[in-house]
């Protein structure tokens, strides 16, 4: 081995080790970020499911299969607060539906996640079946 080879080989080894470490570091950060994002999306989906369940189990519709606005407000405001989620809701202009939006409040997220879902009293099982539907 010549003197040049002896001097160049540690430089090449050092550079390749540094590049390898940087690649590993980026991969590790991406994996952690992905795991955190998956956890937040799962939290969002759980909140949407919990909202659906509480609306389905509470008495929030009148006999004409329309929303009882005060009951819906009470049920949705009774859900526990979460610092990571915002949950705005509004009644549909036609009066038949309730729009529920669940979104992540993470300002560092590269992609903002938001889910909207329309709930109706009939869709949640609050409306009695009509006599001709029982056939």
Image: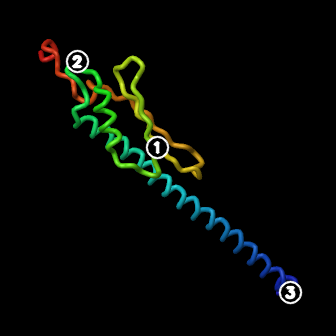
Q: Position of residue 59 (x, y in %)?
A: 22, 32
Task: Name which of mark 2 and mark 3 comes first in the sequence.
Answer: 3
In this rendered view, identify the residue nearer to me: 88 or 35: 88
Is 70 or 104 nearer to us in this picture? 70
Q: Is residue 19 above or below residue 104?
A: below
In the image, 134 versus 55, the foreground residue is 55
Q: Secondary structure at mark 3?
A: loop
Marks 1/3: CA–CA distance: 67 Å
Q: Nearer the viewer, mark 2 or mark 3?
A: 2
Scheme of colours in the image: rainbow
Tag 2 and tag 3, C-beta contact below 8 Å: no
Q: Secondary structure at mark 2?
A: loop
Quadrant of the snapshot with the N terminus: bottom right
Q: Report the number of numbered marks.
A: 3
Q: Which residue is mark 1?
A: 86
| Mark 3, other Cα within 10 Å: few <14 / some 14–19 / many ≥20 | few
Q: Which residue is mark 3?
A: 2
Q: CA distance from mark 2 to mark 3?
A: 94 Å
The residue where tag 2 is placed is 64
Residue for point 35% across, 41% down: 77
Q: Where is the C terminus found, in terms of image quarters? A: top left
x then y, percent, for residue 35: 48, 57
Could you tell me how far apart the alpha carbons at marks 1 and 2 are, in whole angstroms? 31 Å
Q: Residues within 10 Å of mark 1 (few under 14, many from 20)?
A: some
Looking at the image, which residue sits at the far front? 70
Residue 112: x and y, percent?
55, 43
Residue 66 location, x and y as percent?
28, 21
Give the image quarter of residue 52: top left
Choose the circle earlier in sequence order: 1 or 2: 2
């Amino acid at each position: 081995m010549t003197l040049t080879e002896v001097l160049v080989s540690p430089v090449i080894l050092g550079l390749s080790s540094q590049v390898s470490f940087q690649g590993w570091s980026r991969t590790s950060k991406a994996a952690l970020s992905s795991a955190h994002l998956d956890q937040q999306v799962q939290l969002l989906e759980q909140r949407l499911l919990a909202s659906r369940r509480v609306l389905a189990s509470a008495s929030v519709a009148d006999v004409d299969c329309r929303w009882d606005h005060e009951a819906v407000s009470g049920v949705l405001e009774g859900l526990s607060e979460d610092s990571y989620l915002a949950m705005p809701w509004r009644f549909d202009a036609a009066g038949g539906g309730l729009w529920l939006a669940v979104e992540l409040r993470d300002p560092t997220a590269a992609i903002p996640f938001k889910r909207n879902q329309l709930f109706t009293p009939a869709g949640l099982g609050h409306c009695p079946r009509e006599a001709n539907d029982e056939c």
